[in-house]
Image: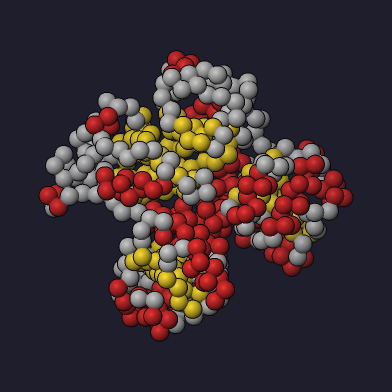
Amino acid sequence: MKIIIIGAGQVGATLAENLANEDNDITVIDSNQHRLRELQDRLDIQTVEGSGSHPDVLDQAGCNDADMLIAVSNQDEINMVACQIAHTLFKTPTKIGRVRSSAYAKYPKLFSDTALPIDVRISPEKEVTKHLSRLIRYPGALQVMEFAEGKVQLVVVKAETGGPLIDQPISYLKEHMPSIQTRIAAIYREGKAIKPDGNTHIRANDEVFFLTAQRDVLDVMSEMRPLDTPYRRIIIAGGGNIGERLAQSLEKEYRVKIIERSPERCRYLSETLNNTIVLNGDASKQELLLEENIESTDVFCALTNNDEANIMSSMLAKVLGVRTVMTIINNPAYVDIVQKGMIDIAISPQQTTISSLLSYIRRGDVVNVHSLRKGAAEALEAVAHGDYNSSKVVGRKISNINLPEGATIGAIVRGDDIILGSGDVKIEAEDHVILFVSNKKQIPAVEQLFQVGLTFF
Protein backbone atom coordinates (compact mmCIF):
# COMPACT_ATOMS: atom_id res chain seq x y z
CA MET A 1 0.00 0.00 0.00
CA LYS A 2 1.05 3.60 -0.55
CA ILE A 3 0.59 5.34 2.80
CA ILE A 4 1.23 8.96 3.79
CA ILE A 5 1.86 9.62 7.49
CA ILE A 6 1.56 13.18 8.80
CA GLY A 7 3.60 13.69 11.95
CA ALA A 8 7.04 12.28 12.78
CA GLY A 9 6.52 12.29 16.55
CA GLN A 10 6.52 9.14 18.67
CA VAL A 11 3.31 7.71 17.18
CA GLY A 12 4.11 8.62 13.57
CA ALA A 13 7.71 7.36 13.80
CA THR A 14 6.72 4.06 15.43
CA LEU A 15 3.95 3.57 12.88
CA ALA A 16 6.33 4.28 9.99
CA GLU A 17 8.77 1.73 11.37
CA ASN A 18 6.05 -0.91 11.71
CA LEU A 19 4.65 -0.38 8.21
CA ALA A 20 7.97 0.08 6.39
CA ASN A 21 9.04 -3.36 7.59
CA GLU A 22 6.02 -4.84 5.79
CA ASP A 23 7.02 -3.63 2.31
CA ASN A 24 4.62 -0.69 2.19
CA ASP A 25 5.47 2.53 0.31
CA ILE A 26 5.68 5.05 3.16
CA THR A 27 6.04 8.84 3.01
CA VAL A 28 6.26 10.87 6.24
CA ILE A 29 5.43 14.59 6.38
CA ASP A 30 6.67 16.81 9.21
CA SER A 31 7.89 20.38 9.61
CA ASN A 32 10.81 19.22 11.78
CA GLN A 33 13.73 18.45 9.47
CA HIS A 34 15.77 16.81 12.24
CA ARG A 35 13.07 14.24 12.97
CA LEU A 36 12.71 13.40 9.29
CA ARG A 37 16.45 12.94 8.86
CA GLU A 38 16.57 10.56 11.84
CA LEU A 39 13.79 8.46 10.30
CA GLN A 40 15.42 8.36 6.86
CA ASP A 41 18.72 7.26 8.37
CA ARG A 42 17.20 4.05 9.73
CA LEU A 43 14.14 3.33 7.55
CA ASP A 44 13.56 2.82 3.84
CA ILE A 45 10.96 5.59 3.52
CA GLN A 46 10.49 8.94 1.81
CA THR A 47 10.06 12.20 3.71
CA VAL A 48 8.65 15.63 2.88
CA GLU A 49 9.34 18.69 5.01
CA GLY A 50 6.38 21.00 5.56
CA SER A 51 2.92 21.24 7.05
CA GLY A 52 0.65 18.28 6.41
CA SER A 53 -2.31 20.64 6.10
CA HIS A 54 -0.89 22.42 3.03
CA PRO A 55 -2.15 21.17 -0.37
CA ASP A 56 1.21 21.64 -2.10
CA VAL A 57 2.97 19.55 0.57
CA LEU A 58 0.41 16.74 0.22
CA ASP A 59 0.81 16.90 -3.55
CA GLN A 60 4.59 16.66 -3.23
CA ALA A 61 4.14 13.60 -0.97
CA GLY A 62 2.13 11.85 -3.69
CA CYS A 63 -1.33 12.15 -2.19
CA ASN A 64 -2.91 11.96 -5.66
CA ASP A 65 -2.32 8.18 -5.82
CA ALA A 66 -2.04 7.29 -2.12
CA ASP A 67 -4.17 4.47 -0.73
CA MET A 68 -4.30 5.92 2.75
CA LEU A 69 -3.55 9.09 4.71
CA ILE A 70 -2.80 8.77 8.44
CA ALA A 71 -2.68 12.15 10.18
CA VAL A 72 -1.13 11.76 13.64
CA SER A 73 0.53 15.10 14.26
CA ASN A 74 0.26 16.65 17.73
CA GLN A 75 -2.31 19.20 16.50
CA ASP A 76 -5.90 18.10 15.95
CA GLU A 77 -6.54 20.96 13.57
CA ILE A 78 -3.69 19.99 11.23
CA ASN A 79 -4.94 16.38 11.22
CA MET A 80 -8.51 17.39 10.43
CA VAL A 81 -7.60 19.86 7.67
CA ALA A 82 -5.21 17.34 6.09
CA CYS A 83 -8.00 14.75 5.87
CA GLN A 84 -10.32 17.38 4.37
CA ILE A 85 -7.80 18.34 1.68
CA ALA A 86 -6.94 14.70 0.91
CA HIS A 87 -10.65 14.02 0.37
CA THR A 88 -11.49 17.16 -1.61
CA LEU A 89 -8.43 17.54 -3.82
CA PHE A 90 -6.95 14.06 -4.06
CA LYS A 91 -9.88 11.65 -3.45
CA THR A 92 -7.73 9.59 -1.06
CA PRO A 93 -9.75 6.41 -0.33
CA THR A 94 -9.03 6.12 3.41
CA LYS A 95 -8.33 8.97 5.83
CA ILE A 96 -7.36 8.26 9.45
CA GLY A 97 -6.96 11.17 11.85
CA ARG A 98 -5.88 11.53 15.43
CA VAL A 99 -8.35 13.76 17.27
CA ARG A 100 -7.39 14.14 20.91
CA SER A 101 -9.59 16.94 22.19
CA SER A 102 -12.88 15.85 23.74
CA ALA A 103 -14.31 19.20 22.59
CA TYR A 104 -14.49 17.78 19.04
CA ALA A 105 -15.58 14.29 20.09
CA LYS A 106 -18.79 15.73 21.59
CA TYR A 107 -20.03 16.55 18.08
CA PRO A 108 -19.97 13.37 15.96
CA LYS A 109 -21.86 15.13 13.13
CA LEU A 110 -18.66 17.03 12.41
CA PHE A 111 -17.08 13.89 10.98
CA SER A 112 -18.75 12.94 7.72
CA ASP A 113 -18.16 13.27 3.97
CA THR A 114 -20.21 16.48 3.95
CA ALA A 115 -18.27 18.03 6.87
CA LEU A 116 -14.86 16.73 8.02
CA PRO A 117 -14.30 13.53 6.00
CA ILE A 118 -12.28 11.45 8.48
CA ASP A 119 -13.04 7.78 7.95
CA VAL A 120 -11.46 6.66 11.22
CA ARG A 121 -10.84 8.83 14.27
CA ILE A 122 -8.29 7.61 16.78
CA SER A 123 -7.66 8.89 20.28
CA PRO A 124 -4.50 7.75 22.09
CA GLU A 125 -6.03 8.85 25.38
CA LYS A 126 -9.10 6.68 24.83
CA GLU A 127 -7.03 3.62 23.87
CA VAL A 128 -4.66 3.99 26.85
CA THR A 129 -7.62 4.43 29.21
CA LYS A 130 -9.22 1.20 28.00
CA HIS A 131 -5.89 -0.60 28.38
CA LEU A 132 -5.43 0.63 31.96
CA SER A 133 -9.03 -0.17 32.93
CA ARG A 134 -8.67 -3.78 31.82
CA LEU A 135 -5.41 -4.19 33.77
CA ILE A 136 -7.03 -2.83 36.93
CA ARG A 137 -9.97 -5.22 36.57
CA TYR A 138 -7.63 -8.23 36.32
CA PRO A 139 -4.93 -7.87 39.02
CA GLY A 140 -1.74 -9.68 38.06
CA ALA A 141 -2.29 -9.50 34.29
CA LEU A 142 0.44 -7.88 32.20
CA GLN A 143 -1.84 -7.25 29.23
CA VAL A 144 -5.52 -7.85 28.48
CA MET A 145 -6.84 -7.68 24.90
CA GLU A 146 -10.43 -8.05 23.71
CA PHE A 147 -11.72 -9.82 20.61
CA ALA A 148 -15.19 -10.44 19.13
CA GLU A 149 -16.68 -7.47 20.98
CA GLY A 150 -15.32 -8.67 24.31
CA LYS A 151 -16.51 -12.27 24.10
CA VAL A 152 -12.93 -13.56 23.98
CA GLN A 153 -9.91 -12.15 25.77
CA LEU A 154 -6.21 -12.72 25.22
CA VAL A 155 -4.44 -12.33 28.54
CA VAL A 156 -0.73 -12.20 29.28
CA VAL A 157 0.49 -13.32 32.72
CA LYS A 158 3.83 -14.11 34.26
CA ALA A 159 3.74 -17.64 35.66
CA GLU A 160 4.68 -17.82 39.33
CA THR A 161 5.48 -20.56 41.81
CA GLY A 162 2.27 -21.56 43.57
CA GLY A 163 0.17 -21.79 40.41
CA PRO A 164 -1.20 -25.36 39.94
CA LEU A 165 0.08 -25.53 36.35
CA ILE A 166 3.70 -24.69 37.21
CA ASP A 167 6.00 -27.57 36.14
CA GLN A 168 2.98 -29.41 34.71
CA PRO A 169 2.17 -30.13 31.03
CA ILE A 170 -0.41 -27.89 29.39
CA SER A 171 -2.69 -30.90 28.89
CA TYR A 172 -3.14 -30.90 32.68
CA LEU A 173 -5.13 -27.66 32.33
CA LYS A 174 -8.00 -29.42 30.53
CA GLU A 175 -8.07 -32.19 33.13
CA HIS A 176 -8.07 -29.71 35.99
CA MET A 177 -10.66 -27.33 34.47
CA PRO A 178 -12.88 -29.53 32.25
CA SER A 179 -15.76 -27.03 32.12
CA ILE A 180 -13.62 -24.06 30.99
CA GLN A 181 -12.53 -23.53 27.42
CA THR A 182 -9.08 -22.02 27.18
CA ARG A 183 -6.12 -22.20 24.82
CA ILE A 184 -2.52 -21.24 25.53
CA ALA A 185 -1.53 -19.40 22.36
CA ALA A 186 2.13 -18.71 23.11
CA ILE A 187 4.82 -18.88 25.75
CA TYR A 188 7.87 -16.65 25.99
CA ARG A 189 10.71 -18.11 28.05
CA GLU A 190 13.76 -15.90 28.63
CA GLY A 191 12.60 -13.72 25.75
CA LYS A 192 12.26 -16.55 23.22
CA ALA A 193 8.94 -17.74 21.77
CA ILE A 194 7.88 -21.34 22.39
CA LYS A 195 5.05 -22.83 20.34
CA PRO A 196 3.09 -24.75 22.97
CA ASP A 197 1.46 -28.16 22.66
CA GLY A 198 -0.12 -30.50 25.20
CA ASN A 199 3.26 -31.78 26.38
CA THR A 200 4.82 -28.35 26.96
CA HIS A 201 5.52 -27.67 30.63
CA ILE A 202 4.86 -24.24 32.14
CA ARG A 203 7.83 -22.92 34.10
CA ALA A 204 7.97 -20.18 36.72
CA ASN A 205 8.73 -16.77 35.11
CA ASP A 206 7.29 -17.87 31.74
CA GLU A 207 5.26 -15.17 29.97
CA VAL A 208 2.05 -17.01 29.08
CA PHE A 209 -0.51 -15.83 26.49
CA PHE A 210 -3.90 -17.53 26.84
CA LEU A 211 -7.30 -17.13 25.20
CA THR A 212 -10.56 -17.68 27.03
CA ALA A 213 -14.07 -16.27 27.50
CA GLN A 214 -14.27 -13.06 29.51
CA ARG A 215 -16.06 -14.78 32.40
CA ASP A 216 -13.26 -17.35 32.80
CA VAL A 217 -10.19 -15.08 32.81
CA LEU A 218 -9.58 -15.12 36.56
CA ASP A 219 -10.08 -18.90 36.81
CA VAL A 220 -7.44 -19.52 34.13
CA MET A 221 -5.08 -16.96 35.66
CA SER A 222 -5.29 -18.84 38.96
CA GLU A 223 -3.70 -21.86 37.25
CA MET A 224 -0.59 -19.87 36.34
CA ARG A 225 -0.07 -17.90 39.56
CA PRO A 226 -1.69 -17.30 42.94
CA LEU A 227 -4.53 -14.82 42.40
CA ASP A 228 -4.07 -11.30 43.71
CA THR A 229 -6.87 -9.84 45.79
CA PRO A 230 -9.05 -7.40 43.81
CA TYR A 231 -7.96 -3.79 43.65
CA ARG A 232 -10.06 -1.23 45.52
CA ARG A 233 -7.99 1.92 46.12
CA ILE A 234 -6.49 3.78 43.15
CA ILE A 235 -4.30 6.88 43.09
CA ILE A 236 -3.84 8.62 39.73
CA ALA A 237 -0.89 10.99 39.34
CA GLY A 238 -1.78 13.49 36.63
CA GLY A 239 -5.21 14.92 35.90
CA GLY A 240 -4.81 15.37 32.15
CA ASN A 241 -7.01 13.76 29.51
CA ILE A 242 -5.96 10.20 30.38
CA GLY A 243 -6.22 10.74 34.13
CA GLU A 244 -9.68 12.27 33.75
CA ARG A 245 -10.91 9.48 31.45
CA LEU A 246 -9.53 6.77 33.73
CA ALA A 247 -11.13 8.27 36.83
CA GLN A 248 -14.48 8.49 35.03
CA SER A 249 -14.28 4.83 34.03
CA LEU A 250 -13.35 3.63 37.52
CA GLU A 251 -15.00 5.92 40.05
CA LYS A 252 -18.27 3.96 40.29
CA GLU A 253 -16.50 0.74 41.31
CA TYR A 254 -13.28 1.89 43.00
CA ARG A 255 -12.09 4.48 45.50
CA VAL A 256 -10.21 6.90 43.26
CA LYS A 257 -7.99 9.88 44.01
CA ILE A 258 -6.30 12.18 41.48
CA ILE A 259 -3.21 14.24 42.30
CA GLU A 260 -2.83 17.22 39.95
CA ARG A 261 -0.38 20.13 40.17
CA SER A 262 -2.46 22.77 38.35
CA PRO A 263 -5.06 24.52 40.60
CA GLU A 264 -7.15 25.42 37.53
CA ARG A 265 -7.20 21.82 36.31
CA CYS A 266 -8.09 20.66 39.83
CA ARG A 267 -11.12 22.94 39.85
CA TYR A 268 -12.21 21.56 36.47
CA LEU A 269 -11.77 17.95 37.61
CA SER A 270 -13.65 18.51 40.87
CA GLU A 271 -16.60 19.91 38.89
CA THR A 272 -16.49 17.15 36.23
CA LEU A 273 -15.92 14.00 38.29
CA ASN A 274 -18.60 12.69 40.62
CA ASN A 275 -16.97 10.23 43.03
CA THR A 276 -13.26 11.02 42.72
CA ILE A 277 -11.23 12.90 45.33
CA VAL A 278 -9.15 15.61 43.59
CA LEU A 279 -5.95 16.72 45.32
CA ASN A 280 -3.82 19.71 44.35
CA GLY A 281 -0.17 18.76 44.77
CA ASP A 282 2.95 17.04 43.48
CA ALA A 283 2.81 13.23 43.33
CA SER A 284 6.60 13.05 43.73
CA LYS A 285 6.38 14.53 47.25
CA GLN A 286 6.77 11.86 49.92
CA GLU A 287 4.75 13.80 52.51
CA LEU A 288 1.70 13.99 50.25
CA LEU A 289 1.79 10.29 49.38
CA LEU A 290 2.10 9.34 53.05
CA GLU A 291 -0.79 11.66 53.97
CA GLU A 292 -2.94 9.85 51.37
CA ASN A 293 -2.05 6.42 52.82
CA ILE A 294 0.00 5.23 49.88
CA GLU A 295 0.97 2.10 51.83
CA SER A 296 -2.65 0.90 51.76
CA THR A 297 -3.22 1.89 48.11
CA ASP A 298 -3.63 -0.94 45.60
CA VAL A 299 -2.63 0.82 42.35
CA PHE A 300 -0.60 3.94 41.63
CA CYS A 301 -1.02 5.15 38.03
CA ALA A 302 1.52 7.75 36.85
CA LEU A 303 -0.14 9.40 33.84
CA THR A 304 1.49 12.79 33.31
CA ASN A 305 3.11 13.67 29.97
CA ASN A 306 6.57 13.78 31.57
CA ASP A 307 8.38 10.42 31.51
CA GLU A 308 10.92 11.38 34.17
CA ALA A 309 8.23 12.65 36.56
CA ASN A 310 6.20 9.46 36.00
CA ILE A 311 9.19 7.21 36.67
CA MET A 312 10.32 9.04 39.82
CA SER A 313 6.85 9.27 41.39
CA SER A 314 6.22 5.59 40.58
CA MET A 315 9.49 4.49 42.19
CA LEU A 316 8.72 6.56 45.26
CA ALA A 317 5.21 5.11 45.53
CA LYS A 318 6.63 1.58 45.28
CA VAL A 319 9.22 2.24 47.99
CA LEU A 320 6.46 3.62 50.23
CA GLY A 321 4.45 0.41 49.92
CA VAL A 322 1.89 0.63 47.09
CA ARG A 323 0.96 -2.83 45.72
CA THR A 324 1.13 -2.18 41.98
CA VAL A 325 2.59 0.63 39.89
CA MET A 326 1.42 1.35 36.32
CA THR A 327 3.34 4.04 34.45
CA ILE A 328 2.95 5.74 31.08
CA ILE A 329 6.30 6.05 29.32
CA ASN A 330 6.55 7.74 25.93
CA ASN A 331 10.26 7.15 25.33
CA PRO A 332 10.56 3.53 24.14
CA ALA A 333 14.18 3.40 25.33
CA TYR A 334 12.95 3.64 28.93
CA VAL A 335 10.36 0.85 28.80
CA ASP A 336 12.65 -2.18 29.14
CA ILE A 337 14.80 -0.46 31.75
CA VAL A 338 12.00 0.47 34.13
CA GLN A 339 10.12 -2.84 33.88
CA LYS A 340 13.22 -4.60 35.19
CA GLY A 341 13.12 -2.40 38.29
CA MET A 342 10.38 -1.21 40.61
CA ILE A 343 7.70 -0.42 38.04
CA ASP A 344 5.29 -3.31 37.54
CA ILE A 345 3.74 -2.30 34.21
CA ALA A 346 5.11 0.27 31.77
CA ILE A 347 2.60 1.38 29.15
CA SER A 348 3.60 2.78 25.76
CA PRO A 349 0.87 5.04 24.32
CA GLN A 350 2.49 4.62 20.90
CA GLN A 351 2.11 0.84 20.83
CA THR A 352 -1.44 1.07 22.20
CA THR A 353 -2.41 3.58 19.50
CA ILE A 354 -0.75 1.57 16.75
CA SER A 355 -2.80 -1.48 17.69
CA SER A 356 -5.97 0.49 17.01
CA LEU A 357 -4.57 1.65 13.65
CA LEU A 358 -3.39 -1.68 12.33
CA SER A 359 -6.86 -3.19 11.93
CA TYR A 360 -7.59 -0.54 9.26
CA ILE A 361 -4.32 -1.21 7.45
CA ARG A 362 -4.34 -4.99 7.33
CA ARG A 363 -5.51 -6.62 4.09
CA GLY A 364 -8.42 -9.03 4.21
CA ASP A 365 -11.30 -8.50 6.64
CA VAL A 366 -9.22 -7.93 9.78
CA VAL A 367 -11.41 -6.35 12.44
CA ASN A 368 -9.10 -6.28 15.43
CA VAL A 369 -5.33 -6.13 15.91
CA HIS A 370 -3.17 -5.98 19.03
CA SER A 371 0.53 -5.24 18.70
CA LEU A 372 2.58 -7.31 21.17
CA ARG A 373 6.13 -7.37 22.48
CA LYS A 374 7.02 -3.90 21.16
CA GLY A 375 5.59 -4.70 17.73
CA ALA A 376 7.49 -7.96 17.18
CA ALA A 377 4.31 -10.07 17.41
CA GLU A 378 0.59 -9.58 16.79
CA ALA A 379 -2.72 -11.01 17.80
CA LEU A 380 -5.46 -10.41 15.26
CA GLU A 381 -9.09 -11.21 14.55
CA ALA A 382 -9.95 -11.96 10.93
CA VAL A 383 -13.35 -12.77 9.44
CA ALA A 384 -13.46 -15.73 7.06
CA HIS A 385 -15.42 -15.07 3.84
CA GLY A 386 -16.18 -17.03 0.70
CA ASP A 387 -16.51 -20.77 0.16
CA TYR A 388 -14.22 -23.76 -0.25
CA ASN A 389 -13.25 -22.73 -3.81
CA SER A 390 -12.65 -19.03 -3.23
CA SER A 391 -11.12 -19.12 0.25
CA LYS A 392 -7.96 -20.72 1.61
CA VAL A 393 -9.57 -21.31 5.02
CA VAL A 394 -13.35 -21.76 4.66
CA GLY A 395 -14.47 -25.39 4.67
CA ARG A 396 -11.07 -26.60 5.85
CA LYS A 397 -9.93 -28.13 9.10
CA ILE A 398 -7.36 -26.07 10.96
CA SER A 399 -4.86 -28.94 10.61
CA ASN A 400 -5.18 -28.65 6.80
CA ILE A 401 -4.66 -24.87 6.62
CA ASN A 402 -1.19 -23.84 5.47
CA LEU A 403 -0.43 -21.49 8.36
CA PRO A 404 2.92 -19.68 8.14
CA GLU A 405 5.57 -20.53 10.72
CA GLY A 406 4.91 -18.87 14.07
CA ALA A 407 1.16 -18.42 13.42
CA THR A 408 -1.41 -20.18 15.62
CA ILE A 409 -5.21 -20.19 15.42
CA GLY A 410 -6.23 -19.83 19.04
CA ALA A 411 -10.01 -19.66 18.83
CA ILE A 412 -12.99 -19.24 16.53
CA VAL A 413 -16.07 -17.21 17.42
CA ARG A 414 -19.18 -18.40 15.60
CA GLY A 415 -22.18 -16.33 16.61
CA ASP A 416 -22.24 -16.58 20.40
CA ASP A 417 -20.16 -19.78 20.47
CA ILE A 418 -16.46 -19.83 21.28
CA ILE A 419 -14.62 -22.78 19.70
CA LEU A 420 -11.02 -23.52 20.62
CA GLY A 421 -8.62 -23.85 17.71
CA SER A 422 -7.92 -27.59 17.74
CA GLY A 423 -6.76 -29.28 14.54
CA ASP A 424 -10.05 -31.03 13.67
CA VAL A 425 -12.19 -27.85 13.84
CA LYS A 426 -13.50 -26.79 10.43
CA ILE A 427 -13.75 -23.07 9.65
CA GLU A 428 -17.07 -21.82 8.27
CA ALA A 429 -17.92 -18.65 6.37
CA GLU A 430 -18.29 -15.57 8.62
CA ASP A 431 -16.35 -17.17 11.48
CA HIS A 432 -14.22 -14.74 13.47
CA VAL A 433 -10.79 -16.37 13.64
CA ILE A 434 -8.38 -15.24 16.36
CA LEU A 435 -4.72 -15.79 15.54
CA PHE A 436 -1.45 -15.27 17.35
CA VAL A 437 1.56 -14.48 15.14
CA SER A 438 4.90 -14.59 16.96
CA ASN A 439 6.91 -13.36 13.94
CA LYS A 440 5.48 -10.20 12.46
CA LYS A 441 7.23 -10.85 9.14
CA GLN A 442 4.61 -13.56 8.56
CA ILE A 443 1.68 -11.09 8.72
CA PRO A 444 1.42 -10.71 4.89
CA ALA A 445 1.11 -14.49 4.55
CA VAL A 446 -1.66 -14.52 7.17
CA GLU A 447 -3.45 -11.68 5.37
CA GLN A 448 -3.39 -13.64 2.11
CA LEU A 449 -5.08 -16.60 3.79
CA PHE A 450 -8.13 -14.44 4.52
CA GLN A 451 -8.39 -12.71 1.14
CA VAL A 452 -11.22 -14.01 -1.03
CA GLY A 453 -10.46 -15.16 -4.58
CA LEU A 454 -12.24 -13.68 -7.60
CA THR A 455 -14.31 -16.85 -8.03
CA PHE A 456 -16.38 -15.75 -5.02
CA PHE A 457 -17.64 -12.70 -6.90
**Rendered position, 91 above or below 43:** below
Residue at the farthest bottom position: 56
* Residue placed most toward the observer, 38 or 350: 38
Residue at the farthest front position: 41
Quadrant occupied by the N terminus: bottom left
Q: Describe the colour scheme in one phrase.
A: secondary structure
* Image position of 127 (left or right of 174): right
Q: Residue at x 40, y 84 (%)?
A: 56
* Image position of 4 (left or right of 347): left
- Whether residue 80 is visible here, answered yes or no, is no
* Residue placed most toward the observer, 376 or 108: 376
Q: Residue at x 55, y 19 (%)?
A: 167
Q: Residue 123 at x, y = what percent?
A: 51, 60
* Residue placed most toward the observer, 437 or 179: 437
- Whether residue 291 is visible here, answered yes or no, is yes
Disc tally is 0
Q: Residue 211 at x, y = what percent?
A: 44, 33
**Rendered position, 399 above or below 162:** below
**Rendered position, 310 above or below 425:** below
Q: Residue 427 at x, y = what percent?
A: 25, 35
* Image position of 280 (left or right of 37): right
Q: Residue at x 42, y 67 (%)?
A: 45
Q: Residue 85 at x, y = what percent?
A: 39, 79
Residue at the farthest right position: 287
Q: Residue at x 54, y 32 (%)?
A: 189
Residue at the farthest top position: 175
